[in-house]
Image: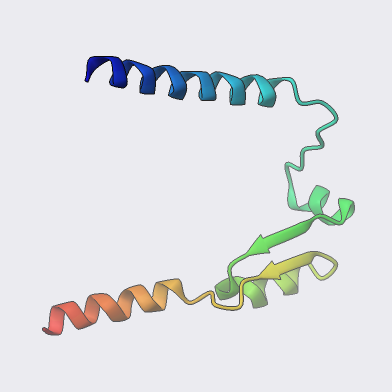
Amino acid sequence: MLFGFGFLILIAVSAYVANLAAFLTKTNQESVLTMTQAVKAGTRICAHPAIRDELELVWTDADFYFHSEGNEFNETMTMASARLSS
């Protein structure tokens, strides 16, 4: 039992260190810090459909992606209401 747990910890730590090393040695990575930079670079921006009108009004040139089923909040409230009424 103890050997199996130790082996699991060894594998988990090895995977974490390998992932960290890969992340820290990655080069040629562009970062976008502001909406203006994202629009200028032509980066696709993921946004929630609830704020679609506001975003498209302010950032007319941006390449937005709005999930077609962006009603998670409504579904959560419906489920909560159903539980309360039961």
Residue 52 location (% of width, % of height)? 64, 74
Q: Residue at x 23, y 15 (%)?
A: 2
Residue 17: quarter of image: top right
| Number of numbered discs | 0
Colour treatment of the image: rainbow
- Residue depicted at 66% across the width and 78% down the height: 53
Q: From the top left corner, tell me how far across and down residue 79 is, in percent.
A: 27, 78
Is residue 68 shown above or below 44?
below
> Which residue lies at the image location 54% right of the left edge and 77% below the top edge?
69
Q: Is residue 56 above or below residue 22?
A: below
Q: Looking at the figure, which quarter contains the N terminus? A: top left
Residue 30 quadrant? top right
Question: In this orientation, which residue lies closer to the viewer: 3 or 16?
Answer: 3
Residue 43, image x and y in percent?
81, 55
The x, y position of residue 21, in whole percent, is: 65, 19
On screen, residue 12 above or below 85: above
In which quadrant of the rendered view does residue 74 lie?
Answer: bottom left
Q: Residue furthest left?
A: 86
Residue at x 68% of width, y 24% of height = 22
Asked if residue 32 is positioned above or below residue 45 in the image, the reply reads above
- Left of 3 or right of it: where is 9? right
Horizontal side of residue 17 vs 23, given as left or right = left
Q: Is residue 39 left or right of residue 45?
A: right
Left or right of residue 48, residue 76 in this image: left
Front in this rendered view, residue 78 or 8: 8
Q: Quadrant of the C terminus?
A: bottom left
